């Protein structure tokens, strides 16, 4: 595996972020200034950084068992959320759509605790069993999506920014009626969903044009915000 890029030096050491369940790299790009590596079970040719293809939890366990985890300073994990996201427990469940999804939040947290490193677990709004230590919204970053994401922080804290009121509705069809608005719906197909270029612009992501990757990614601004906060946090200063 290619070593992660190290860019910012803090107290003589270079902080490295491990991006687990990396998908197309929305979160990883935000952490780029701290250096990163990626891990995803699917082939991700659009991922903009070196990454390891394989089962994320198996790889994380391998890093812990071999001591290689000590190469890193911070871990971000976005385990699959289909089981308990708002769409699954709302519309899809009521209509009998979709299938059975595995909830990987608990086993991911267990491994993250074993790393001994500060970490973040990300999940969208829904019923995922994480602490909502931080909630971010696209409006906080001037994006064309709302996309609320919740973050559980392990081993460190962050100042919670105020939630900015939304400027209007999400564009598209709802229950037979069409609504216009300043945001696009970054999920699914049909129902007035945005085009690929519209999704790219709304999310601030231009390195992938795969709809599935765009609809599942974390907006880069979110992890940039978290990364900057971590780089100035007391836990990193003490570790340095």
Image: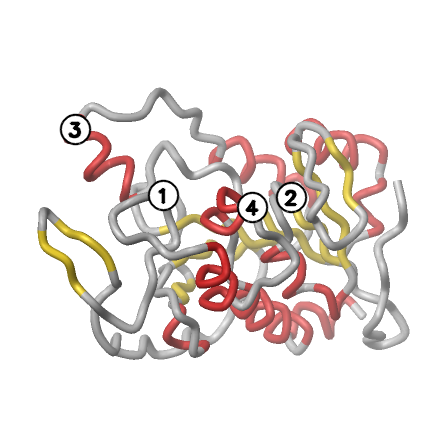
Image marks 3 and 2: residues in contact by CB distance under 8 Å: no
Tell which tag, 3 or 4, sits nearer the viewer: 4
Tell which tag, 3 or 2, sits nearer the viewer: 3
Using the numbered discs, state the Cα–Cα distance from disc 2 to disc 4 in whole angstroms. Answer: 20 Å
Using the numbered discs, state the Cα–Cα distance from disc 3 to disc 2 in whole angstroms. Answer: 32 Å
Q: Name the image quarter holding residue 207.
A: bottom right
Q: Which residue is mark 4?
A: 210
> Of marks 3 and 4, which one's residue comes earlier in the chain?
3
Q: Does 2 appear above or below 9?
A: above
Using the numbered discs, state the Cα–Cα distance from disc 1 to disc 3 in whole angstroms. Answer: 15 Å
The residue tagged with tag 1: helix, strand or loop?
loop
Q: Name the image quarter holding residue 62.
A: top right
The answer to whether residue 21 is left or right of residue 192 is: right
The residue tagged with tag 3: helix, strand or loop?
helix
Q: Which residue is mark 3?
A: 95
Q: Which residue is mark 2?
A: 20
Q: Does 129 appear above or below 185?
A: above
């Amino acid at each position: 595996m290619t070593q992660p890029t190290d860019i910012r030096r803090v107290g003589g050491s270079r902080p490295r972020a491990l991006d687990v369940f990396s998908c197309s790299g929305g979160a990883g790009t935000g952490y780029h200034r701290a250096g990163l590596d990626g891990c995803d079970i699917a082939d991700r040719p659009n991922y903009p950084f070196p990454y390891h293809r394989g089962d994320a939890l198996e790889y994380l366990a391998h890093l812990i068992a071999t001591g290689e985890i000590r190469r890193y300073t911070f871990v971000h994990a976005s385990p699959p959320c289909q089981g308990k996201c708002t769409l699954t427990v709302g519309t899809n469940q009521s209509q009998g759509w979709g299938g059975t999804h595995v909830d990987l939040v608990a086993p991911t947290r267990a491994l993250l605790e074993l790393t001994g490193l500060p970490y973040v677990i990300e999940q969208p709004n829904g019923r995922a069993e994480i602490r909502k230590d931080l909630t971010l919204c696209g409006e906080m970053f001037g994006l064309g999506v709302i996309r609320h994401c919740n973050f559980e922080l392990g081993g460190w804290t962050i100042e919670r920014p105020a939630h900015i009121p939304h400027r209007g509705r999400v564009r598209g069809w709802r229950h037979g009626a069409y609504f216009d608005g300043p945001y696009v719906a970054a999920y699914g197909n049909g129902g007035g969903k945005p085009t690929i270029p519209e999704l790219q612009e709304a999310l601030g992501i231009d390195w992938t044009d795969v709809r599935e990757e765009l609809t599942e990614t974390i907006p880069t601004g979110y992890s940039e915000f978290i990364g900057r906060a971590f780089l100035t946090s007391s836990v990193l200063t003490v570790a340095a």
